Amino acid sequence: MVADRTARRRPWTVLFVVAWLGVIASVTLLPVASGPRLPSTCFFCGPLGGVDFVLNVVLFVPLGLGLAALVGRTGLVTILALGITVAIEFLQWRIIPGRDSSLGDVTANALGAATGALLMAALPSWVRARGALARRLTTASAAVAGGVILLGAWLVVPAVPAHGVAVQVTVERPNLDSFDGTVVALRLHDSAIHATQRLQPAALLDSNGTVAIETAVTGPAGRTQRQAMIVAIANQVEEALFVGQWGSAAVFRVHTQANTLRLRTLMVRLEGAFGQEAPRDTQLTLTASASPRAIHLATSSAAGAVGLAFPHTAALAWTALLPWDVALTPGWWPANALWLALIVLPVGYWAAAGGGAPARGWWPGLIPLAAVVAGPLAFGISWPMPGEWAGLVGGIMAGTAAQRLTRAAIRG
């Protein structure tokens, strides 16, 4: 009977593997704009090498799941994935324009496939886990959730680059638009700075761990299609801060602890900062600051003022893994709630299967809640928003509901 079910599923499994290979090819084998050549021996290549490594692992997990369903052995799955990866890296190295191959990509892809194969072997018993096994899985998933939440709290804290930086004003960069205005004044922490000025990293943060910059520009010329740099403080490999225009919005980001792991830094967006076409003598002042607690961005002119405050919470960890630039507004909070819900969903699932006294099965659920409280206390970030607390509760409830549905399906 089991053999018959396996035989019926095999064509669908083959189809899935072929389809996912197509997904991998579309992500890895399409030409891209050429950038600086990176060493082939690097693991975390470039400023966003950490993002690339993690996403390469995630990209190959489904392939590992599919191959394990076909061949059933983790070692063989890893070997097959290595062969696929080497072929991809060779094409990127010799044929595909703008692509780089690296040892880090090979390692990440093999690790992702092996993870998928291990999950395929473990998932049946995990889904049906009861009693002591379910309680162990509850504790493990709660510890992982708590660790991810604390890591997210640390990632959003402003930090300084490792090397000296220089002030750059309205410089044209690849894949960015030009800012059609003039910077007439710059102030960093109430001290005047100027284009090309070199700064020591320690000068960027004050005693409260805050970076603050004020930029006065004249003649903003309406919307841009892409980002346009107004001012950046950076060196050849790191960016301390960036103030720019994107469409009719002002955007701002600063160097945070996420950059130390080569992950992406949160960028915030203030809508309506740049309105319609303005005369050349119109002056607009942009004020931006980032502290462990929040990012503030505001603009003021003779026509009025707009501003926003964007709280730094542990739920923003998902932004560190984005493969592209996204400028967020406070209206993105549902994504934070969803992130927290997904993190704690396994805790609710296995806690509901633990059996025994409620306290015995559910106490590990306090671990992520403790991490949510510990993050603000340890790193000075903001407390979770009400919607983010709702995400935590909703994730636990969703996990409990999934456990009940699974149990009913198994019984049926």
Image (cartoon, rainbow, N blue to C red):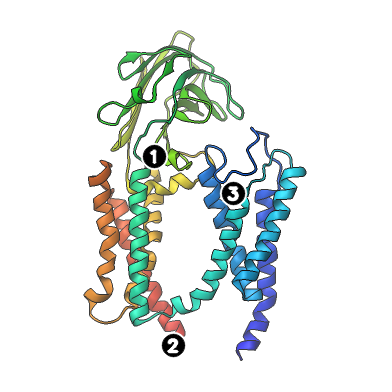
Q: Nearer the viewer, mark 3 or mark 2?
A: 3
Q: Nearer the viewer, mark 1 or mark 3?
A: 3
> What residue lies at 24% left-to-right and 76% top-to-bottom?
360
Determine whether, in the image, residue 184 is placed left or right of residue 28.
Answer: left
- Mark 2: which amino acid? Arg
Q: Is residue 398 visible?
A: no
Q: Which mark is residue 411?
A: 2
Tell me the residue that label 1 is attached to. Answer: 257
Q: Please provide percent x and percent y for residue 14.
A: 69, 71
Q: Is residue 410 visible?
A: yes
> What residue lies at 62% left-to-right and 64% top-to-bottom?
63
Q: Extreme bottom residue here?
A: 1
Disc 1 vs disc 2: Cβ atoms closer than 8 Å? no
Q: Which image quarter: residue 328?
A: top left
Callout 1: SS: helix
Q: Please provide percent x and percent y for residue 361.
A: 28, 75
Tell me the residue that label 3 is attached to. Answer: 104
Q: Which mark is residue 283?
A: none
> What residue lies at 57% left-to-right and 54% top-to-bottom?
108
